[in-house]
Image (cartoon, coloured by chain):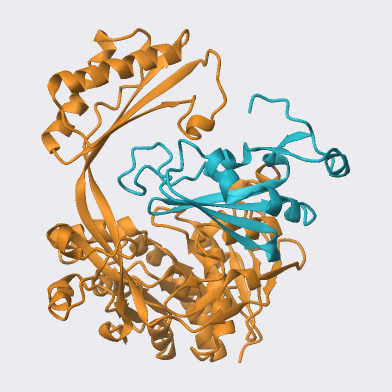
Chain colours: A cyan, B orange
Amino acid sequence: MKVNLLQLAHARSGDKGDTANVGIIAYQPEYYPFLEEVLTPERVKKHFTGICNGKVERFELPNICALNFLLHEALGGGGTQTLRHDAQGKTLSTAFLRMKIEVPEDKAREWGLKRIQDKG
Amino acid sequence: MKEYIRIASGQGFWGDRSDAPIEQVRNGPIDYLVMDYLAEVTMSIMQKQKIRDPKLGYARDIIPLMKEIIPDIIEKDIKVITNAGGVNPIACRNAIFEIADKMGYKDLKIGIVHGDDIYDQIDALFEKGIYLKHMDSGESLESVKNCVYSANVYLGAQPVVAALKEGAQIIITGRVTDTGLTLAPMMHEFNWNPDEYDKMAAGIVAGHIIECGAQVSGGNFLAGWKEVPDMSRIGFPIIEAYPDGRFVVTKHDNSGGLVDQRTVKEQLVYELGDPTNYITPDVIADFTSIQLKDDGKNRVKVFGIEGQKPTDFFKVSISYSDGWTSIAKLTYAWPDALEKAKKADEIIRDRINYLGLDFEEIHTEFLGVNACHGPLSHPVDEPNEVILQIGVRGSNQAHLERFSREMIPLVLGGPPTVTGFSSGRSRPKEVIAFWPALIPKNLVKANYDVKSM
């Protein structure tokens, strides 16, 4: 079943120069191993095509069921020189959570997930 | 030794809610009030102010605040620790002495921490062979040395602890790390040694959790913002710290907002790099060691934190002038709002070419359609309005000025039903860029002194 990542995790994003970080936090501990498997840096880099021009790094925080991603060259030069409305990448958290994830039917049923219906 | 101490955050940045620190000192028990006023860009603004007037260069909001809370902090013996001193902690202290004097508090002891400002030492450092190389590119500062506005070392908690030991009621610092402001009272009260790395790291994690104020107590809370009670009176966070390094994140009982494991987790990942290597001047903290546990309503217990020996370097943040930007906006209404905005963008780009304006970058966004999520945005059919935002960046100030004059004429000479120009044309803004570098700790002399008027 295809679902939005928004159903499985919450997130917060911020900036360090031209690098944005997005922390993805599993809503339930049982989602974490699944997210760790699915959210590879390659997958995330592809998702942010046209936004992140550099590499994507991933760090694991199993203690809080979270993954931290660094998106390099993702803020149009960053901080004070960017021309973007979202200069600090504050909204990249939900841009990340737009990602469509294929969840096995049995897991999706067990976790009570809803199939994607919106335009996102 | 106290069983525990309560450290309250009163300000997450310069411009944060002005009555938050007042509520922190009045609405419940606290021992320390810590306030962060310094973002990178703030230092350059303050340095410019100080050049114009040697009595300026600090966060002036601190003065009316102190006028309000000095009687409370003296009565309740609350210590205030803040980096509001910016590039001029001495002037900041003098200004506080002046109002305290008028209020009849002549014995107020105020400490300052300085030595972070190395702006005047750059040439001397170059002579010693310290070229303040860019942390990422490795390039010497030489290329931008003549455009530097400010250069400040991120100091740690230790000089603040020294000032606390001398009995300061208020400590005004320059560029001390946000996290160090929170660690300092724990080191002081619990007699932690700098080589007790796990405890030091616990203090740093506590600092990270409260350094953005209400962002851990229900603000910017994605997982459950709709369930946050009384957000118009959102309570700022409080750390209840214990001598062994455990602490609880909480807030005053009578305040709005929410503290739970989800709010704490969101703040833990905020502006995080490699979680195993959270480098501060005081210690390297390992965020993968952090354990959270519910501890009652609006209380989260944090424990298990591990740390390692800090590096031999301080980080320096150097700001320099790096050209200009101008960002202009116009609003187009239904029908065909997006099509009209796109046409206007096309016209402006034609004008830029026709006039031969030279920019390093031209960037267009359509607010309401794709400004936040860019190419990931879903299509919007027939929005009621679209805001066209065009930004340009370049080094030729005259070209930036000319661009700013090109947008508003579209009101009469471009696509129809356009508004949103009442604030006038955009003004070119100087770009202050940042140059992060490292400096050996032994070349920096952190100073402090404590005195009363």
Residue pictured at 38% horizontal, 54% vertical: A17
* Location of residue A2 with respect to B74 vertically, above or below: above
Q: Which residue is depicted at the point 33% across and 9% down?
A: B415
| Residue shown at the point (54%, 61%) measured from the top left | B23
Task: Give percent across and percent down for residue A37.
Answer: 70, 52
- Against B187, is B301 above or below? above
Residue B244: % across, % down: 65, 86
Please state, as top left, top right, bottom left or bottom right, where the C terminus of chain B lies in the image: bottom left
Of B426 and B250, the residue lying toward us: B426
Residue B371, image quadrant: top left
Image height of B36 relative to B369, above or below: below
Q: Quadrant of residue B247?
A: bottom right
Q: Is residue B31 in sight in this rendering?
A: no
Residue A87, placed above or below residue B305: above
Question: What residue do we see at 26% from left, 84% from top?
Answer: B443
Q: For residue B409, what is the image quadrant? A: top left
Residue farthest to the front? A42
Query: Where residue B119 sits in the image (x, y, percent)?
Result: 19, 70
Is B139 displayed left or right of B388 in the figure? left
Which one is in front, A27 or B143?
Answer: B143
Which quadrant would the N terminus of chain B be assigned to in this image? bottom right
Report the label total: 0
Task: Find residue B234 and report its horizontal and vertical position in percent.
Answer: 59, 52
Q: Is residue B42 visible?
A: yes
